Amino acid sequence: MGITKDYQVQGSRIFFRCPVCETRRTYPIAHNLRQISVRCYKCGGKSMCRLNRRFRNRSQQAGKVLLITQEGREFEINLNDISENGVGFDVPIGIARAKVVTLGEEVRIRCSWNSRLFGNSRFVVQNVQGQRVGAKKRGI
């Protein structure tokens, strides 16, 4: 496939630079995409573009972590990314349909493979779109 690189989305567009021939071009991006494959119009080189819509950089982080709700219920979720102010994760379909996570709810996340990743941080759910959930660190 080629090289995978992070691109900042601004105004529903990315500024793409081909890793092979260094040609530059802007491309329109649909609002629901998290990554896209782009072929250079000049040399034909392909690269995978991971899309970042946040103002600050986020690091791609994947793995199973434990979500703990205010009521103390625990669910295994799939971590997607972390930024200095928040976290993005996917809730399994069965749990998402049960709507166990709601906007404004305070949750905790525990990571068994890296205990320092979240520590004692609490998060407030900011966005829920199907299985995808975005949460902001409490107090920020």
Image (tube, rainbow, N blue to C red):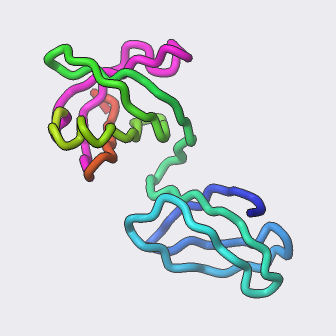
Give the x, y percent position of residue 100: 17, 33
Q: Which residues are magenta?
A: 101-129
Q: Position of residue 75 (x, y in %)?
A: 30, 24
Q: Position of residue 64 (x, y in %)?
A: 46, 27
Question: On the rendered structure, is 115 left or right of 68?
Answer: right
Pick the front one: 57 or 71: 71
Q: State the image coordinates of residue 29 (x, y, percent, origin top left).
A: 48, 74
Pick the quarter of the image with the C terminus. top left
When asked about the image quadrant of residue 18, the answer is bottom right
Left or right relative to 95: residue 11: right
**Is residue 83 in sight in this rendering?**
no
Rendered residue at 51%/56% (across/down): 52
The residue shown at (46%, 53%) is 55
Residue, far right: 21
- Residue 46: image quadrant is bottom right
Number of numbered discs on residues: 0
Q: Residue at x 83, y 83 (%)?
A: 43
| Residue at image point 48% right, 36% down | 82
Residue 60 falls within the magenta-colored stretch: no
Residue 26 versus residue 63 in the image, above or below = below
In this rendering, the answer to whether 69 lies above or below 80 is above
